[in-house]
Image (cartoon, rainbow, N blue to C red):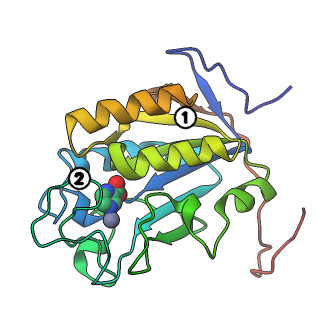
Amino acid sequence: MEPSSGDTSAGGKILIGARDALIVVDVQRDFCPGGALAVPGGNEIVPVINGIVSLFGRWVYTRDWHPPDHVSFTDRPEFRDGSWPPHAVQGTPGAEWCADLQMPMNAILVSKATEPLREAYSAFQVERFDLAQFLRHRKVERVFITGLATDYCVRQTALDARAAGYAVYLVEDAVRGVAPETTAKALADMDAAGVIRVRSEQLEDSGERPQADYDEDGNPLGHD
Ligand code: VGL
Ligand code: ZN
């Protein structure tokens, strides 16, 4: 029996187990209402994410973590790729996690787009940390993607995870987009890449969890 290969048909239950990881993309204040690059309804996904966190035993939280002079920032932003207002600047309140977002102690944190001249919409594009390899070494086979924004960082994360060979699930009620047209296009791109759309209510606990990375004293276990 393969405990983590649940029923993936539309509306079916999906059992979350040891080979699954939850990816939470850029749930930061600047992407929530009141922020510099506010995504409509961005804050509404926080309780949805909080409701599924405990089903998982592996978590990756990504954050946009720009220098103040990041290449994507412009004085007259058009709110599209390459033309954003300053947002998610390292160490500023706008770069902090949205209020009430739960984050397990053992979650992995990946900061991205940290260099002035490079854009990085996905944590798989980070140069100094190989997220695909990190997940592979931990026997992860399926990733469940949540966060902001559907049309940019969520889209790119899902496409990169597919390219890295993972089965990818987009948790539709746990994402929001910047604009309707680009969001529709992003969903079509993800569909074409084989990303499976699910809703948070479909996810169920198998009771199975991955082996710990560390022993009780914090020493790495290194079972690879
Ligand atoms: C994002 C625009 C600019 C995102 C990040 O997290 O989707 N979008 N930077
Ligand atoms: Zn950004």
Residue 27 seen in the current view = no
Q: Tell me the amino acid under the disc marked 1.
A: Tyr
Give the label, 2 or 1, closer to the camera. 2
Residue 83: x percent and y percent? Answer: 22, 62
Residue at image mark 2 = 80
Relative vertical location of residue 117 with respect to residue 20 in this rendering, above or below: below
Residue 135 lies left or right of residue 157; in this view the side is right
Q: Which of these two is toward me, 192 or 169?
A: 192
Q: Which of these two is toward me, 14 or 9?
A: 9
Q: Residue at x 39, y 74 (%)?
A: 65
Q: Residue at x 23, y 46 (%)?
A: 178
Relative vertical location of residue 224 with respect to residue 170 in this rendering, above or below: below
Q: How crowded is the residue under tag 2: few (<14 C-alpha within 10 Å), some, or many (20+)?
A: some
Q: Tell me the amino acid under the disc marked 2.
A: Arg
Residue 2 lies left or right of residue 117; in this view the side is right
Kindly indicate the quadrant of the structure image that contains residue 214: bottom right
Residue at image mark 1 = 169
